[in-house]
């Protein structure tokens, strides 16, 4: 397309935001070609590229335009200046944070969702879409071991799922906000939990961070002591947050023992499985996640280890009615515009009654489409890749004799630190950051550090379905070479 919109003066006037069929086809073809090129050529690209703020503004800032711009030019600019300057979290050698190793089928699902612009807030507006979402939720509920009366909702990600879980826990256990209420979580729990509690009005005295043991698992002894102390001081414990695969190390808290404790103490058990819970689809993951099905609520992020593009998180609740009770709009709140919807509420599932949003997209389509296209066995094999490559990394690091394992391979994550012969801890810690920077500048792979017991450690999370041990080996060789060079300078 050489211009924004061509128009025959003899034909009827065109609506303001309308393209002809030919223009839509050309634009779609160009966009599709870009996405295919991304998927086919991603291995040849660096894993991360970042512009400075000044460079980004120089390339991309424009005043709000009055006149049209040919969309072909805009897509070309995106291909040149936007998409290459990003973390490629779907790159097979992106081992940092928690990758989002997407797949092409799910990308098509996202396109179909946007293209049909389905409002999926209530049944009346989206009966077919709602049934697809309920079907996928049922698959996940069953996989996690939840009972038939469980229910859930797809949200943007783990942060919103964790916040929503606390809302259900608060409304169920407390009835309303209570300034004496306390939530317990470990020092390895994702920061979204602390942030969500703050947003919900829980002060510092109500957010109890509990120590972890030598394996970075929540300490039952420390938790029991904290609960006893709080009760003695007139506080009101009501919720424990456990981890099913921490972001830092992949550690799984002692879920069966925590479930026993919560049942005994009358506490809500929320399991943050944003990273690790999807591994329950694999026998090794299911063994590591024993007790997952005893949770009152579970966070699970399909845009992590279920290989979906951003954004799709999920909250599952053991009793769907409790979820609905927590989020239902009360009559006194005067949602008069929903009168025709709420007349059907007893028969239908309305997702605005299960979460914070009224307006929400059809989030489950991409996950449904890829699970149906490839089948569960393929997803199980994809999860196996993460286990295998992380195991290989640990074995290689141990065999090298130059690295110490801080935490062994568990749920696809391994952490490690340079042995640093002749270097003190402070020098090794400083070297760790320089090695990260060297690898990022190199562009072959991305590995980041994390803090464990106050000291930095390198961390690998190789859960891409197309990750390979040969590329992991080349990455570890680079890290070793950079560490040797930085040690010589120290």
Image (cartoon, grey):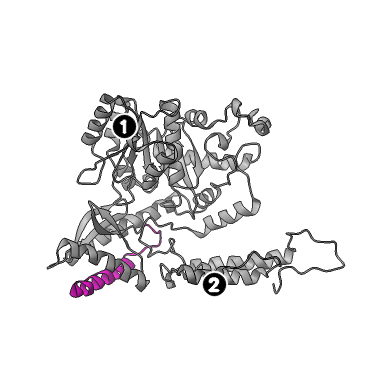
Q: Is residue 346 visible?
A: no
Across and down, in percent, residue 35 comes to 54, 65
Label 1 CA crowd tier, 10 Å (few <14, some 14–19, many 20+):
many
The mark tally for this picture is 2
Task: Report the residue that reaches farthest toward the right.
Answer: 10
| 480 in the magenta segment | yes
Name the residue nearer the viewer: 260 or 388.
260
In space, the residues marked 2 and 1 are separated at their CA atoms by 54 Å
Across and down, in percent, residue 310 comes to 49, 54
Q: Characterize the magenta stretch by its predominant secondary structure.
A: helix
Q: Which mark is residue 59?
A: 2
Q: Which numbered disc, 2 or 1, marks the residue closer to the eye? A: 2
First in sequence: mark 2 or mark 1? 2
Q: Is residue 253 above or below residue 347?
A: below
Q: What is the secondary structure assignment of the residue under circle 2?
A: helix
Report the residue at 31% width, 52% height from top. Answer: 248
Q: Left or right? Give the position of 382 relative to 428.
A: right
Report the residue at 41% width, 26% height from top. Answer: 174
Name the residue nearer the viewer: 292 or 187.
187
Name the residue that disc number 1 marks: 259
State if disc 1 and disc 2 touch (CB < 8 Å). no
């Amino acid at each position: 397309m050489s211009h924004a919109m061509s128009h025959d003066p003899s034909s009827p006037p065109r609506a303001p935001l309308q393209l002809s069929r030919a223009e839509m086809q050309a634009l779609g073809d160009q966009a599709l070609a870009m996405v295919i090129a991304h998927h086919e050529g991603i291995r040849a690209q660096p894993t991360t590229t970042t512009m400075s703020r000044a460079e980004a503004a120089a390339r991309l800032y424009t005043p709000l335009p009055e006149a049209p711009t040919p969309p072909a030019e805009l897509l070309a600019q995106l291909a040149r200046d936007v998409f290459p300057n990003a973390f490629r979290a779907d790159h097979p050698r992106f081992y940092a944070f928690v990758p989002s190793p997407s797949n092409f089928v799910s990308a098509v699902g996202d396109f179909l969702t946007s293209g049909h612009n389905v409002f999926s807030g209530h049944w009346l507006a989206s009966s077919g879409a709602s049934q697809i979402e309920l079907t996928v939720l049922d698959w996940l509920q069953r996989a996690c071991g939840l009972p038939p009366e469980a229910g859930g909702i797809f949200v943007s990600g783990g942060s919103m799922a964790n916040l929503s879980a606390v809302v259900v826990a608060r409304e169920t256990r407390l009835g309303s906000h209570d300034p004496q209420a306390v939530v317990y979580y470990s020092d390895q729990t994702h920061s979204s939990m602390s942030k969500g509690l703050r947003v919900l009005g829980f002060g510092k005295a109500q957010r109890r961070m509990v120590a972890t043991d030598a394996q970075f698992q929540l300490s039952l002894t420390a938790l029991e002591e904290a609960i006893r102390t709080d009760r003695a001081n007139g506080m009101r414990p009501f919720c424990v947050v456990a981890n099913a695969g921490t972001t830092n190390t992949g550690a799984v808290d002692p879920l069966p023992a925590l479930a026993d404790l919560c049942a005994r103490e009358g506490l809500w058990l929320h399991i943050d499985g944003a990273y690790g819970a999807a591994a329950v689809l694999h026998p090794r993951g299911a063994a590591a996640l024993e007790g997952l099905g005893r949770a009152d609520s579970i966070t699970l992020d399909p845009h992590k280890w279920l290989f979906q593009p951003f954004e799709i998180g999920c909250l599952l609740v053991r009793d769907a009615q409790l979820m609905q009770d927590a989020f239902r709009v009360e009559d006194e709140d005067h949602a008069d515009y929903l009168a025709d919807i709420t007349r059907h509420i007893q028969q239908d599932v309305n997702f605005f009654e299960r979460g914070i949003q009224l307006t929400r997209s059809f989030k489950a389509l991409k996950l449904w489409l890829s699970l149906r296209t490839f089948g569960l066995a393929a997803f199980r094999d994809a999860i196996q890749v993460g286990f295998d490559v992380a195991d290989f990394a640990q074995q290689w690091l141990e065999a090298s004799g130059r690295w110490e394992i801080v935490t062994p391979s568990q749920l696809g994550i391994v952490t490690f630190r340079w042995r640093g012969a002749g270097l003190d801890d402070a020098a090794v810690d400083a070297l760790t950051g320089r090695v990260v920077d060297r690898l990022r500048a190199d562009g072959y792979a991305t590995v980041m550090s994390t803090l464990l017991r106050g000291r930095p450690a390198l961390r690998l999370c190789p859960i891409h379905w197309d990750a390979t041990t040969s590329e992991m080996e080349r990455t570890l060789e680079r890290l070793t070479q950079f560490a040797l060079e930085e040690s010589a300078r120290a």
